Amino acid sequence: MIAPRRFLPSVSSLLALEAVDRLGSASAAAQELSLTQSAISRQLKTMEDQLGVTLIERSQMRLHLTPAAQTYVATARSALQDLAQAALNLKANPVGGSLNLSILPAFGMHWLAPRLLDFARKHPEVTVNLGTRLRPFDFATQSFDAAIHFGRRDWSGVEYLPIMQETILPVCAPSLAPSGFSSLATLANAPLLHMETRPDAWEHWFSAQNHVASGLTGMLFDQFATMIQATIHGLGVALLPSYLIQEDIHAGRLVPAWNGPDVSLGNYYLVWPTGRPTPEPLRSFRAWLTDQLEGSTRPVS
């Protein structure tokens, strides 16, 4: 049930209060909102009268919110942002719902994007909005319904749908080692490229080859796309997901640096927050994704 109307100031008053809090003066708020300074003052006075509390403290030429009002405006700002996002979603898809999905750049581009046309054809009522995040975040503070997560089941407050296991391969440019490296010791001393989100990848890979390697250093990257290009241009040896580099290996731009057991550092999952109603677009996306995965090898959950 929505609170009594007397506790719900107008959107205009909330916008005026938020702008004054952020900008520090009625004149600046008026300029941003395309109003007069007196109109801003009237909006604030109307809100104070409606709520029966003092919201504004005046000192010299600057306006300050009272401590209680500062707490109130933080909630109001979040509500205004939610309203604005809801309006954008409605405008983007006036006859259906929207799915706000956080993706990992490489996985989103190479695995998910080629399949999304099928989802769009089967669910024209759903608009999928994609945003990039490289690390887990708080669903309570981000406007996402779900996310693609890589790693282990280490994201709290979410449910998981396994998508696939990632296998990594050590690769390099043919100019660096046309037939791969002659020994693991030689490989360990080569220029090794590292991924920021997987800082211990090389140590885990060498351990899987029964070779101890520590203190490994080298160039650091935050995305696979730039790491792949650096590898192709001979800057070093990289551990790259096999699904990302099949075309580069087939074209001869990259070659395997070592022929050893397959190594996986984790799985890809679809995750969504617990403790909140599941939007219908997310239900549709999960069902579609489950159909996409039928018959494929699932990662260990």
Image (cartoon, rainbow, N blue to C red):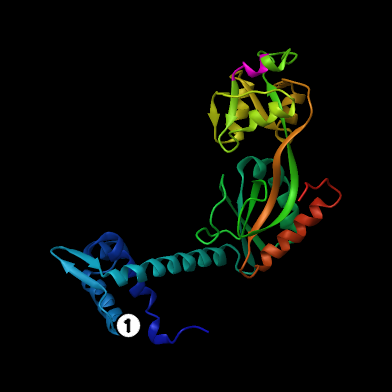
| Residue 129 magenta-highlighted | no
* Residue drawn where x is 70% and y is 21% of the image: 253
Question: Which residue is more in the foreground, 258 or 98?
Answer: 258
Left or right, 214 with respect to 209, comes to left
Is residue 122 visible in the rendered structure shown here? no
Residue 301 place in picture, x, y as percent: 76, 51
| Quarter location, residue 139 | bottom right
| Quarter location, residue 93 | bottom right
The residue lying furthest to the left in this view is: 60
Residue 175 place in picture, x, y as percent: 66, 13
Question: Which residue is more in the foreground, 241 or 159?
Answer: 159
Task: Determine whether 222 is above or below 295 in the image.
Answer: above
| Quarter location, residue 52 | bottom left
Question: Which residue is more in the foreground, 60 or 209?
Answer: 209
* Residue drawn where x is 69% and y is 23% of the image: 171
Task: Determine whether 300 is above or below 13 in the image.
Answer: above
Question: Which residue is more in the foreground, 271 or 101?
Answer: 271
User: Which region of the structure is painted magenta?
Assistant: 186-191
Task: Determine whether 110 is above or below 12 in the image.
Answer: above
Which amino acid, mark 1?
A: Leu
Left or right, 79 with respect to 38, comes to right
| Element marked by disc 1 | helix
| Residue 190 magenta-highlighted | yes
* Residue drawn where x is 74% and y is 25% of the image: 210
Is residue 195 visible in the rendered structure shown here? yes
Residue carrying label 1: 51
Task: Determine whether 128 is above or below 74 in the image.
Answer: above
* Residue drawn where x is 50% and y is 63% of the image: 85
Q: How many marks?
A: 1
Residue 47 place in picture, x, y as percent: 30, 79
Tell me the crowding category of disc 1: few under 14, some 14 to 19, or many 20 or more residues within 10 angstroms, Cα based: some
